[in-house]
Amino acid sequence: MTILSTHVLDATTGTPAAGIEVMLSSGGAELARSRTDDDGRITEFPCPPIEAGTYTLTFATGDYFAHRRTETFYPEVVITFRIPEQRPDAAPDENRKFHVPLLLSPYSYSTYRGS
């Protein structure tokens, strides 16, 4: 089974960004919605099994900053990424994990493939 997680850190405060709504979609279809917990994390999305393919995480950053009465340039952050097929010559991995962190501030953001 493939596990997908995310973590959002508010770079302006150096603290986890709790309560951000995040939508997972693929091919234009919504698969799941969840909110970051008090540690700014979604440890696993409540959705059908994740297969190889292209996915999008949409973070409702405008709502997050509005709640903090902070102006932002980005009303949402959209991250599109690809889950690759398992190589046929590789040993089967029962628990592949993909972690997509977001470092956020009102006027910039960055992301990477985490571990």
Image: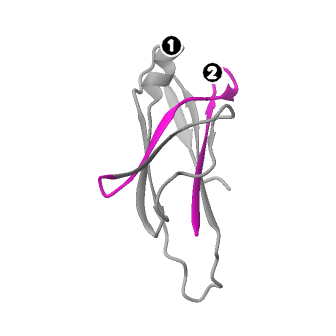
Q: Where is residue 77 in the image (x, y as percent from the top left)?
A: 44, 36
The residue shown at (59%, 60%) is 3
91 horizontally vs 76: left or right: right
* For the residues bearing labels 2 and 1, Cβ distance under 8 angstroms: yes
Q: In this view, does 30 lie above or below 20?
A: below
Residue 65, horizontal then vertical, whole percent: 50, 19
In the rendered image, residue 26 lying in the magenta stretch gets the answer: yes
Which label belongs to residue 70? 1
> Is the C terminus in the top left, top right, bottom left or bottom right quadrant?
bottom right
Q: What element carries label 2?
A: loop
**In the image shown, does 38 or 72 lie closer to the viewer?**
38
Pick whichever, 36 or 114, lies toward us: 36
**Quarter placement of the N terminus:** bottom right
Residue at 51% in and 52% down: 46
Q: In this view, does 55 lie to the left or right of 104?
A: left
Res 12 label: 2
Which residue type carries mark 2? Thr
- Residue type (three-letter) at the residue carrying disc 1: Thr
Residue 88 in which image quadrant: bottom right
Q: Is mark 1 on a helix, strand or loop?
A: loop
- Which is closer to the viewer, label 2 or label 1? 1
Q: How crowded is mark 2: few (under 14 residues within 10 Å), some or many (20 or more)?
A: few
Magenta extent: 1-29
Percent coordinates x, y for residue 30 in the rendering: 35, 50
Q: Which residue is drawn at 42% across and 56% down?
A: 55
